[in-house]
Each structure stands twice: as structure tokens, then as C-alpha cells.
Amino acid sequence: MTHQPQEALVEPDAVGLGSSGDDPGEGHETVRGRGGRFTGYWLMLPSALWLALFFLVPFYSLIAMSLYDPTGSNLTGYDMTWHVANYVDTIQAYWRPLLRSFWYAAMATVACLVLGYVLAYAIAFKAGRWKNLMLVLVIAPFFTSFLLRTLSWKLILADEGWIAEGLRTLQILGEDGRLLATPFAVVAGLTYNFLPFMVLPLFASLDKIDNRLVEAAGDLYASPARAFFKVTLPLSMPGVVAGTLLTFIPAAGDFINAELLGSPNQRMIGNIIQNLFTNQGDYAAAGALSMTLMIVITVGVVFYIRRAGTEDLV
Amino acid sequence: MSALHRLGRWVGEHLVLALGVLVLVYMFVPVAIVGLMSFNDQASRNVYRFDGFTLDNWLNPCDPSGMCSSVVRSVEIALLATVVATILGTLAAFALVRHRFVGRGPLNTLIILPMAAPEIVLGSSLLALFVSAGFGGQLGFWTIFVAHVTFCLSFVIITVRARLSGLDDNLEQAAMDLYATENQTFWRVTFPLVFPGILGAALLSFSLSFDDFIITNLNAGQTVTFPMYVWGAAQRGIPMQVNVIGTAMFLVAVLIVLGNEVARRRQSKVTA
């Protein structure tokens, strides 16, 4: 095979390694590889190496760390003793914050789904020429520090703030009822902080829906509500699945909201892991808890994607 | 068409948009409060409430000791991590869209995984690596840099890949048909078309890196970045100047995004 550039243009498989020329799925991608057949490898190599070295290898280190002898310290070093009991001990000691994390994350995810669906639907179908602007606005709060925005919620939910005062006047909140330092405050903070992660994938899948399908449902005498539940919602399921995952996973591992908006009674698993690492220097226990979190989330995600039946998320 | 039906229509037309705008407003309430608090004439560091209007915080942003040096450190790390992640990620995106090679499927999965893992797990695994490799005593600028490139890389690859795969092949075809060399086609046609995606990815990287706390805190040692300064201040009492930094960052980012958008519109008018 000659390697003239024009050749690469007309012949989709000039780079080789692909299936034979009559591949209808990829056939239109005629501007394939420039240069030689190894160009793809060279372009990919730096990123692949980086991710292998600083993402995959660290997981191996974390697994190893979670099995260290807990009597060591980060000053004297740890002995590798395959101490599986680390898992049992930490789960026994911290099962409450662990469960609480998943519970809070689940509530925040549901709240995000409701708020996010409304916003994503409005952007996709109702925004007209304001679509791009609204999308930019969804991302814009990210440019103010996460911590500062969370601290603002501390101000909004403060005991002497308007909202707490108002709810007390309306008798919804008891005489000395508080919003701050309650599970509500933590879940509200999580909901707020991870909402954009819900809106963006929801928008992506809503925006792809062919409006003619919804119109067809209307022509066939479906009410708008029925058309929504029978056509729009099922077609947006990939976005729902991606959005709930992108919200739930970081929310379950977060400790900033629990620390700034909650009290010690709302501590989540992230607070414990962080504290074990930075204050107590108990790396073995912290590693074991971190792995537990990762394992539970991975199993949950696999199960969830199977149930939801959308394996082609990306 | 029944009255009920028409009512449903109307509600669908207007209520949803109004609710959507309301959700957007909700997203901006804390941003507005950060802006407002940047003008706060703070009576005491221990009480976080609005005590009165002043320009002092904006005029003397570096008054709280250690804050501005933490901002400088965050900017240094973010710039460096952004440059490295954007270059590596853009190359990878080209490889994934334009080339075929063995292992493309697993690599596509590998790229998603860092975004799907909770930050606390990513942070602890990197710390585990650094400690076991003997860098436990040297945590600081460079370990933060490595951590930031790692989580920015995935976002860059995905952003640039999306832009690249949405590209219209015909423009490149046309350039080649008009006897442009491969290099000319790439630099005069392909690259300018992909550039907004690369710029967006860089902006995203910068703000992710500048804002990261959870991963940074585990791998920082004695180094203090801006979010770590805010975290520490939240325990001791917050100087209002942190809100000045937060607001300034927000305004700069919004200006960049708007500038990019205006340039894009002008460009599309020229080509149209």
C-alpha cells in the first residue's frame, strides 16, 4: 500500500488495522489517519501512559495499602501483612457514615433529577434562541469556587437568616428549629453542588430527540402528559442514567457539604477517610474504607446500568 | 381541541420555561451572595453575615496573610496542569477519532473511569502511590500537579473528541481537492475548526484545577492552594477577601466565554 496523502483520503483503511473497506458504519469517515500506520499509537501514547501510571497503578497501591498491618504509621512505614481484617474493622466502626453517605447521595440525586429535568427540558425544547446562553449559564456557577458557594449556603440557611426565620414564623420549623447542621442542609448542599452534572447529560439526550416523534404522539390523540411519559421520557433514559450516576457518585464521596453545612451527626464517609488520612495518619484503615466505597459504588453502578438497560452511555 | 387540552398546551409552553429559569436563578443565588459578600464591611471574622457596604476588600485584596500567595500557587498549578493536560488530551482525542489502533475500546473506557470515581478515592489512591514510591515526605507542588493533570486529562479528551467527531469532513475534503497539502489542510482547516473545543477544554481544566479541594488536600503536604486556604479559614473565621477572589475569577471566566462566543458568531457570519 502506498502512503501518499491522497491515497489516505480515498481509502478509509489506509491506516490499516481496521476492518475491510466495506464497513458501512464508519465508511463516511474518509478523512482518516494522517501519516503512517503508527500515528494513532504515538498520539495516544502520552495520555495512555499518564493514565496507566497515575490512575491504574495508584489503584494497585491503594489495594496494597488497604491490606497493610494497621500497627504501622506513615512515619515508620507499614508492613504488608495481607491484613484483610482492616476491611472488617473499618466497616464495623464506620458503617453508619457509610450508609448515611449513600442515603444522602440518593436523596440529593432524586432532588437533582427533578430540578435538572425541568431545566434541561426547558433548555432543549422551550429556550429557542436562548438555548446556548442558558447552557453557558448552567456551567457558569462552576467558575466561582465550590467552597465559597457552599459557604454561601451556610449564610442562606443560617439560624438568623430569612429562610429559617420565615419557616419558624410559618410554624413549619419548631420554635428553636434549625436548618443548618441538619441532614436537610447537607442534602440541599449536595443537590445544589452537583445539579450541573445532572443537567448536562439530560440536556444532551433530550436535545437529540426528534420533535416529530412527540408531534406524532399528539396527532395520534395522546395528551401532552401521555406523550411525555410514553415518548419523551423513555427516549431521555440514557441522559437520566448518565446524570444520576454523575450526581450520585461524587455526592457519595463528598465531605465538603457535610463538614460546612452539617454537624458531626451528619458526617459522611468522605469526612472519615479524609480525617483518617490527614489527622490520624491511619493510612491502612483509610485505604480500606476508600476501597470499600469504591467497591460498593462499582457494584452498584454495574447493577444499575444492567437494570436501566442502557449500556451504551458513552 | 378541548379546553383542558389547550390548558395543557399553554402550561407546557410557558410554565416549563418559567420553572427552568427559576432553577437557573437558584443556581446563581450563591454566586450572587459571594459577590455581595465581597463588598461586606465585616465586623468580626467569626460572624459570617452582611454588616455593611465597603470597597475595602476590593482595594486591599491581599490583606489577609497567606491568601494571595495561595492564589498565586493555585494559578501556577492550574496553568501548568492545563497546558500539559490540554496537549496530551488533544493528541489523544485526535488518535481516538482519526485513527484506528488496537485497544481503542479499552482506552475509551479508561478515559471515562477517572471521571466516574469519587474524588476521595482518586485522591487516596494517588496518595497511596506517592507514599509507596517514597514521595510521602515530599508531597507538595509537584504531587498536586500530577493529580490535577490526571483528572483534567479525561475532561480534555472527551471535550475535544466531541468537537472533532462533530466536524464536517467536507471542508477538509474540499481543501485537499484544491491541492492543499496535508499540513496546510491541518493547520488552515482542521485545527481552526477544532480550536474552540480545545480552548473550552483548557478553560474547563483550569477551573477544575483551580477549584479542586478534595484530591489536592490529600496530596498537598504543607503546600497551601486557594481552596485549602478557604477551607482553613472556614474553621478559623473567613476574611471577606476570599469572596473578592471568587468574584474576580467568575468575572474573568465569564468574559472569556463571552469573548469566545462573540468571536464564534463573527466567524460564522463571515463563513455564511
Image (tube, coloured by chain):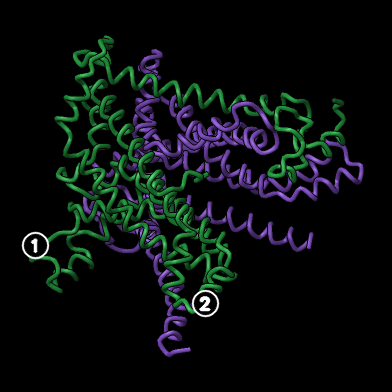
Chain colours: A green, B purple
Q: Nearer the viewer, residue A136 or A314?
A: A314
Q: Is residue A76 visible?
A: no
- Asked which quadrant contains residue A56, the reply is top left
Q: CA distance from mark 1 to mark 2?
A: 56 Å
Q: Chain of mark 1?
A: A
Total label count? 2
Q: Which is more foreground, mark 1 or mark 2?
A: 2
Which comes before the other along the chain, label 1 or label 2? 1
Residue occupying image coordinates x 53% and y 58%: A136
Residue B11 versus residue B186 in the image, above or below: below
Answer yes or no: are tags 1 and 2 on the same subunit: yes
Q: Position of residue A28 (x, y in %)?
A: 75, 46
Q: Nearer the viewer, residue A114 or B195?
A: A114
- Asked which quadrant contains residue A271, the reply is top left
Q: Position of residue B176 (x, y in %)?
A: 87, 43
Callout 1 amino acid: Asp
Q: Chain of mark 2?
A: A
In the rendered image, the quadrant that contains the N terminus of chain A is top right
Residue farthest to the right, as pictured: B179
- The residue where tag 1 is placed is A176
- Left or right side of A12 for B216: left
- The residue where tag 2 is placed is A220
Residue occupying image coordinates x 48% and y 53%: A201
Q: Nearer the viewer, residue A127 or B173?
A: B173
Q: Nearer the viewer, residue A176 or A72?
A: A72
Give the secondary structure at mark 1: loop
